[in-house]
Amino acid sequence: MSNPVYLALDEPRLDEAHTLAERAKPHIGGVKLGMEFFYAHGHHGVLDIAHLGLPIFLDLKLHDIPNTAARAMQAVAVLEPAIVTVHASGGRAMMEDAKAAAGEQCKVVAVTMLTSLDERDLARTGVAGSPHDHVMRLADLARESGLDGIVCSGREVAAVHREWKDGFLVVPGLRPAGSAAGDQKRIVTPRQARDDGASVLVIGRPISRAADPRQAARDIEATL
Ligand SMILES: O=C(O)c1cc(=O)[nH]c(=O)n1[C@@H]1O[C@H](COP(=O)(O)O)[C@@H](O)[C@H]1O
């Protein structure tokens, strides 16, 4: 089975990001490039990292009117990413149009509820109810919109997996036992998320901020 770990290269310096990915490469299945990287380096940066030969997850979290989101998707589809994110709260038309604009080979997944939020944070955005209910509702919407899957925390992935067996389920907010949560609130271990049905495990700081990132990636791989 291929390695489900995608290393989040949340690093504004291109050479540092490249070196980090190169070091971790034997123990990861792909790399995730998010806003921090893409806003700094754009297409040129993505192509540089693509030379490493790992699948690229472009985490741009598109969230706009359908026309704008679809045209943004079209603009990045030329980079042939393996995965791109949109926000489920952008609604059905936005997700449908973004999916249609992505290449055939590209999985489009919808972010449901950020792993940095808890129930209290959710209530303050005007959404009543539990994270579980909110994630399930948005997962249904993403599925109806023809997306490949969703992004959720490891706390909800088992429930989503039960309802959406072939859904492509991306789980960030992962912390090996004993590592610092930082700004993440809904965390589980990589192994737990894997056992509960995650297709992709997104891991950043537990690897990138480790004294020896290659060893950290190897240690996580060994737990899976
Ligand atoms: O879409 C994401 O990847 C994402 C969604 C989410 O709900 N929570 C979340 O942490 N992420 C991303 O996953 C990565 C987590 O990084 P670490 O907390 O350093 O492991 C970051 O790049 C976040 O942007």
Image: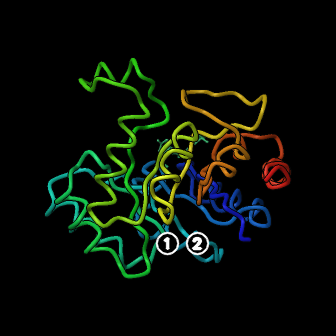
Taking depth in this image into account, of 198 and 44 the one nearest to the observer is 198
Distance between the alpha carbons at the discs numbered 2 and 1: 6 Å
Q: Amino acid at mark 2?
A: Pro
Please state the horizontal and vertical placement of residue 209, each as a whole percent of the image. 71, 40
86 left or right, relative to 192: left
Tell whether label 1 touches label 2 (CB within 8 Å). Answer: yes
Furthest-bottom residue in view? 104
Residue 36 vertical position relative to residue 32 in the rendered view, above or below: above
Indicate the secondary structure of the residue bearing disc 1.
loop
Q: Residue at x 26, y 50 (%)?
A: 63
The earlier-in-sequence mark between 2 and 1 is: 2
Q: Which residue is mark 1?
A: 82
Please state the horizontal and vertical placement of residue 81, each as a whole percent of the image. 46, 72
**Dot 2, crowdedness within 10 Å: few (<14), some or many (≥20)?**
some
Taking depth in this image into account, of 45 and 64 the one nearest to the observer is 64
Q: Residue at x 49, y 68 (%)?
A: 46
Please state the horizontal and vertical placement of residue 58, each as a whole percent of the image. 46, 62
Q: Which residue is mark 2?
A: 55
